[in-house]
Amino acid sequence: MKPLNVLLSCFAAQAAGTNEFNSTRSLRTETWTVTNEHGNITVPGKFPSHVHLDLYAAQVINDPNHGLNDINLRWISAQNWTYTSNPISGLSKDKGLSTWLVFDGLDTYSTIALCGKTVATTDNQFKQWHFDVTSVLHECDSDPSISINFGAVPAIINKLNASGIETWPLDVVYPFEYPNRQWVRKEANDFGWDWGPAFIPTGPWRDGRIVQLRDGEAYSLNTNIDIYRKGQVNNLAPDQTKPWVVNASLDFIGNLPKQHSMQAIITDATDKSKVLYSGKLSDITRSGSTISGSVVIDGEKPQLWWPNGMGKQSLYSITITVGCGTKAPALVSQRKVGFRTILLNTGNVTHEQISRGYQPGNNWHFQINGHEFYAKGANMIPPDAFWPRVTNERMSRMFDSVEAQNFNMLRIWSSGAYLPDFIYDLADERGILLWSEFEFSDSLYPDYPEFVQSVSDELYYNIRRINHHPSLACWAGGNEFENLLLPIAKRVAPERYPYFLGQYEHLFISVMFNILAENSRSISYTPSSANNGWTKIDFSLPVPMVERYDNKTNGDLYGNTDYYNYDSSVAFDSTEYPVGRFAVEFGYHSMPSLETWKEALDPEDMHFNSTVITLRNHHYPAGGVEPNATKGAQGLAEMTLAVERYYPAPNKRDSVANFSSWCHATQLFQADFYKSQIQFYRRGSAMPERQMGSLYWQLNDIWQAPTWAALEYSGRWKALPYVTRHLYKNVIAAPYFDRKTGDLDFWVTSDLWKSVAGHLSFRWVDLKGKAIAGNAGMPKSVNFTVPAINSTSVYKTNIADVTLPDQRDAVLLLSLQADGHLPNSNQITQFTHSDYFLPAWPKYAKFSDPGLKLSKNKSTGSFTLEATKGVALYTWLTHPEEVTGFFDDNLFVLLPGEKKHVGFKLQVGTSNNQWMDKVTVESLWDLSTRD
């Protein structure tokens, strides 16, 4: 083993550099122009960028997100566009040097030229590309320029579709807007989705660089660090007593010295003096331009990485060098890593589980470091239609909102883009597991050799790039194949179904699972985000994972669930909710706030059924490139009807105020609907289905529009996250009311790993805040004990036995206190939760003006609220559009005489707190008033 100071001196020598020229030159620093195919538009360009963004910066177009620009700007995607650099000075043409162009992402079909000579073409947005241009550079008579011509994607894929290579029934390649997206390896939602626009952006969307190397030098393109327990294999539970294996594998360009070794230093990420390992790697292998080695580390030595709420997010820094002897290393790569095991268990329920009350069938749950846990979170979609606009600062604010909702997991929905490393870095630091997916969704796909090779290259790069992140929870092949697309194919083309099934198993199991297993032993795989699990895994088989599909046993339970029901009349009937092992998607759409609409609409368009809003509502999708107001109106009608069924329907004199109230009312329904479902799914942890996760649809928005999002485009919170932050506490109480029978059942649910004990208090008051006599015949409190990750019914009654003078003039307040232990903690923690129950729908409740008063403390940035006349239901604080952030509580019940103190996390805005004067407060009462 080499001493630490020797290795550090090697790294220092590498950092100082031994060359007289800059061997790596970012293309960000060059000057670029962008020109259309007709030559009549030329504007300054950036790198990385998209054409729309550069046209916007040059004021050729206005904000792509404004108005109906998703329709009006289609001329951009219909043309070819060329990015051209100014002549690049300072490149060396010395003999013995190799010169490379490296692109981390080109979107999508491109032709690359250097010095006017074509050097390469590309056809996959998700791949890293590298090209040896040494000979081309030597032939340049002057400083070289780079040009990248991006082809018009719609025209290219339409030609591919017309070629007859493959055909499918329209039902399984259904277009949201632009057709034929299945042919191209590009972000599928670029072609339109039911929550987003169809801009089909093009351009150099990720970084690029010029690399020059001397003989015996190499440049690291990609690094795969795989950390797993010895003997661990994909999809099977590892032995937690085994030592750790750290396998490092580097992809490079250039060449290595003939005599070389691999060495590693692993230190605490925040304290480099704490060295976990320093020395050579063993089992060195070389395959083409990839070199790999590994080391075994004592199983008890590293501090484990845990998700949010389960322990510390311990991170380590690993530096790998190749050829580091007396000379500076030829190759260096550094990553942050964590030691953890993560398992997605979708295999058969065991006899031991059945003996503990599990319903037979298949599992669907996650295990971290050998512990089952309840997954709490949401589905993340692309945060912008144009990825170059997505910054670390913006995503850090999003993760603030994720943590504030007590999440431990996000599902990174497929058919966006593979996330950049900085988002995984944020997840590593915050303890948010990222269920990750390959970019395939809601379509069948071809599997001809060239397509499969492109997909294989894409997967190889991204699996290896992302694998070192401890936040990586699993890989899924794509979205909704086994529960949606394949059954549709079987129904509409039964004679071709075996062929379609064979295609699916070839690409999504044989190809994808094998590539994952060859590059990672630490991560589980499932071919489809929603399915019924597997019956057998055997890599000696042509299809190494045998999926269950519909091969079920009556009475057994399989898989996870999606649930979307837009019949709002049954929204709060829990018998309609699916019973499964894991709720991976569920939701209902709502409007964004007035403050967010102002970002994208002209004043004349700010009314609920305006043409612009109707056409920006992509639920339901147009189904083609022609705008379809009828489909949009159908989705708006669903929101309207849901509000009218359960809440006071706004009818204000001022049209903008009325529009704002309607937007808010749709958010109230969305929040209550999700609340009902999350309570139901969490209670399922005690049921035979052993329900172990709920991820609502969807976390964030890609633009300003009616969608399922909890966070609006700029990060503003809708009503929903203020509800979920309470629902995803460790210990919660929930009422379950059957309006058909009158049965009223109160449950306490805990996701703690040890039993928890406490009491639940009941307090009935009328809507003036006066206590109801005898607490309406209910006890003032009950004691409870809930086992680990479980639920317990603590009190049952029937509404007929609750002695309420008037069910429309009553509200029940629930208050929980419990003592227990957080995971991996020996300290006793007190857990609290509050909720309420209205026996009548809000629209029928006899609420009145609560006389709300709001005061501000600008020195602390906090607010105090008080109801002076009656109970304030759905008390709601609104912050002005010039600030971004969120209150620490909102959408609560406030009784007369009580003072509620509320803080605000200011993320973007002025620090002098003048914005606080514009904060307003309202309640359910305000929906019913004319002014």
Image: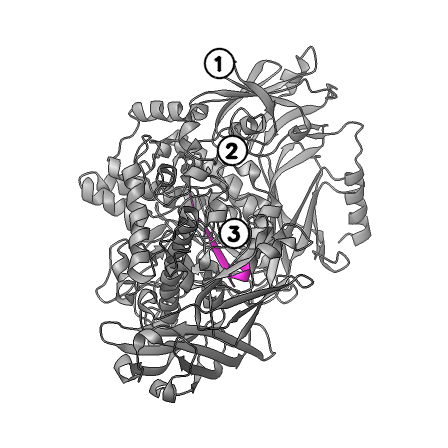
Who comes first in sequence, dot 2 or dot 1? Answer: 1
Secondary structure category for the residue under label 3: loop
- Res 828 quadrant in image: bottom right
Q: Which mark is residue 425?
A: none
Q: Are marks 2 and 3 in contact (CB under 8 Å)?
A: no
Mark 1 crowdedness (10 Å alpha carbons): few <14, some 14-19, many ≥20: few
Q: Is residue 652 above or below residue 682?
A: above
- In this orientation, which residue lies closer to the viewer: 122 or 133? 122
Where in the figure is residue 31, as x and y percent of width and height? 66, 23
- Say which of marks 3 and 1 sits in front: 3
| Quadrant holding the N terminus | bottom right
- Res 365 quadrant in image: bottom left
Range of residues picked out in magenta: 403-414
Who comes first in sequence, dot 2 or dot 3? Answer: 2
Q: Which mark is residue 38?
A: 1
Secondary structure category for the residue under label 2: loop
Secondary structure category for the residue under label 1: loop
Residue at point 62% right, 23% down? Answer: 32
- In this orientation, which residue lies closer to the viewer: 458 or 564? 564
Q: Which mark is residue 716?
A: 3
Left or right: 533 as drawn, with respect to 554: right
Q: Which residue is mark 2?
A: 63
**Residue 405 belongs to magenta span:** yes
Where in the figure is residue 695, as x and y percent of width and height? 42, 58
The answer, for residue 199, to whether it is visible in the render is no
The mark total stands at 3
- Say which of marks 2 and 1 sits in front: 2
Mark 3 crowdedness (10 Å alpha carbons): few <14, some 14-19, many ≥20: many
Residue at point 78% right, 48% down? Answer: 7
Mark 2 crowdedness (10 Å alpha carbons): few <14, some 14-19, many ≥20: some
Question: How many angstroms separate mark 3 from mark 1 (CA)?
Answer: 41 Å
